[in-house]
Image: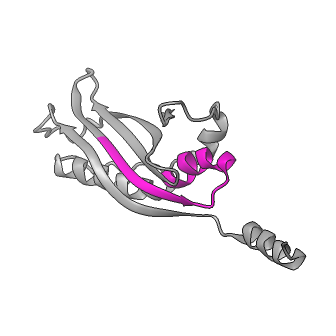
Amino acid sequence: MTNKKTENVEAANESTQQTGMQILAQYVRDLSFENPGAPNFAAANSPSVNVSANVGARKFSDTDYEVSLKFKIEAKVEDDNVQFIAELDYCGVFRLINTPEDEVRSTLLVEAPRQLFPFARRVLADATRDGGYPPIMLDPIDFKELYDQGDNQPATSDNKMDDKEIN
């Protein structure tokens, strides 16, 4: 026989459990810098820079997920000559704590990339600087707006969430 007071306390404890997200690891999975335009002594020729990005997530366990930010930056000068191509796959492993099932996807595709972005930005800035160009300083990305514009479909059966492309 259960005590009514005990049931109320247990219910209150369940409703007040804090939700959260822990970053277990961050790492560069893949980094490539191709520099066919080197040496580029024509400083007056400012290259046009095209940046694309993707966000993806995959499930490791009931609470742990890997989130990946993939960037591709291509710089060209007037005659469509490629100066450099930088590609980065920057990942983090996140543990979700007491996150309701209907919030998992948005947490992984909005909040987790917000945590990873400054680190990925620094890696790309360093790579372009080390390649002999001014460092590429990516503008902040509003992951929430991009998520809201997306289709917000549930995770696929292979434990992988669809990549979201950001241009």
Q: Position of residue 39 (x, y in %)?
A: 10, 39
Picture quadrant of residue 35: top left
Please tell me which residue lies in front, 74 or 90. Answer: 90
Please tell me which residue lies in front, 22 or 47. Answer: 22
Q: Residue furthest top?
A: 79
Residue 142 visible in the picture: no
Picture quadrant of residue 34: top left
Indicate yes or no whether the magenta region holds residue 146: no
Q: Position of residue 2 (x, y in %)?
A: 84, 73
Residue 84 visible in the picture: yes
Q: How many numbered marks appear?
A: 0
Rendered residue at 80%/72% (across/down):
12
Rendered residue at 41%/44% (across/down):
69
Q: Residue furthest front?
A: 1
Residue 115 as seen in the image, left or right of residue 33: right
82 vs 148: above or below: above
65 vs 155: above or below: below
Please tell me which residue lies in front, 153 or 116. Answer: 153
Q: Position of residue 93 (x, y in %)?
A: 41, 54
For the record, the magenta segment spans: 88-113
Residue 161 as seen in the image, left or right of residue 31: right
Please tell me which residue lies in front, 103 or 64. Answer: 64
Indicate yes or no whether the magenta region holds residue 107: yes
Quarter of the image with the N terminus is bottom right
Picture quadrant of residue 6: bottom right
Rendered residue at 25%/54% (across/down):
126
Residue 81 as seen in the image, left or right of residue 69: left
